[in-house]
Amino acid sequence: MKFFADTADIDAIKDLHDHGMLDGVTTNPSIIKKSGRDIIEVTKEICSITDGPVSAEVTAIDAETMIAEGRKLAQIADNIAVKVPLTWDGLKACKALTDEGTMVNVTLCFSPNQALLAAKAGATFISPFIGRLDDISLDGMELIADIRTVYDNYGYETQILAASIRNVNHMKDCAIVGADVATAPPNVIQAMAKHVLTDKGLDAFLADIKAAEIKIL
């Protein structure tokens, strides 16, 4: 499963890259707002850090303007994936941009039917929102599993990009059900390394190292 960082924090992106844990980056208007930077400027810098796909979202809601914005965003770098909403207009924009050779991430997916439409429109990625479904007492992971089944049934190449990930259990479950990509805040990816028994074992090793005065360098 690929790891995408859901952030525009340059330092966090570089840290994940240096650890070999970065396969791409996703952004959205809320993330760009939080960064306090111009969308073109910060997206260009992110694209210089990773060769993987970097999702940059359009701001329009009508197809023609989405297509125009998508073309402008695609000029930032070769690894831009234009992010469009899963609306009827968004699907039209997806088809047009895909036909031009641009990667497209169709976002705000909440049903297998929507995911099927996105695949037929040629989406590179479909972004089902796990956490937001969980928030209203629906099973976000069931959605990922259902989309996996639909795509496998018909050989669609659209990658399932699990989004709205809140915790390490979401990451584990996404890997189990077969998501192609999981995009998560950097702190969630980092937290995957933590386990109480790892900490306990390390403390014991350190105590023995000190007692035995073991030195390597």
Image (spheres, grey):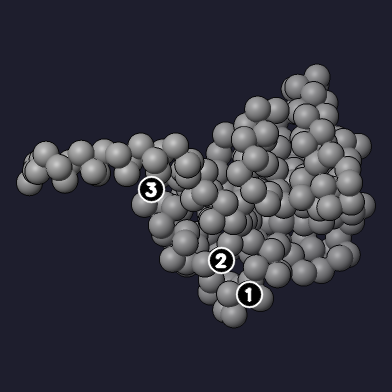
One can see residue 117 in this view: no
Amino acid identity at mark 2: Ala
Q: Are marks 3 and 2 in contact (CB under 8 Å)?
A: no
| Image: 190 above or below 29 | above
Tell me the SS state at disc 3. loop
Please state the total of marks drawn on the protein image.
Answer: 3
Indicate the quadrant where residue 151 lies. top right
Label 1 belongs to which residue?
Answer: 34
Could you classify mark 2 by the number of other residues whose Cα lies within 10 Å: few (under 14), some (14-19), or many (20 or more)? many
Distance in Å between CA atoms under marks 3 and 2: 18 Å
Could you classify mark 1 by the number of other residues whose Cα lies within 10 Å: few (under 14), some (14-19), or many (20 or more)? few
Residue situated in front as seen by the camera: 105 or 65: 105
**Where residue 12 sits: x, y (%)?**
47, 62
Amino acid identity at mark 3: His
Which residue sits furthest top? 153
Tell me the SS state at disc 2. loop
Q: Quadrant where the N terminus lies?
A: top right
Could you classify mark 3 by the number of other residues whose Cα lies within 10 Å: few (under 14), some (14-19), or many (20 or more)? few
Q: Are marks 2 and 1 in contact (CB under 8 Å)?
A: yes
* Numbered circle sitting on residue 107: none
Q: Residue drawn 88% across and 64% down?
A: 62
* Numbered circle sitting on residue 19: 3
**Where residue 117 sits: x, y (%)?**
87, 39
Label 2 belongs to which residue?
Answer: 8
| Image: 186 above or below 61 | above
Indicate the quadrant where residue 7 lies. bottom right
Among numbered discs 3 and 1, the one appearing first in the sequence: 3
Q: Residue drawn 70% across and 28% down?
A: 177
Task: Please identify, in this view, whether the residue under mark 3 or under mark 2 is nearer the observer.
Answer: 3
One can see residue 89 in this view: yes
Does residue 60 appear left or right of residue 35 in this picture? Answer: right
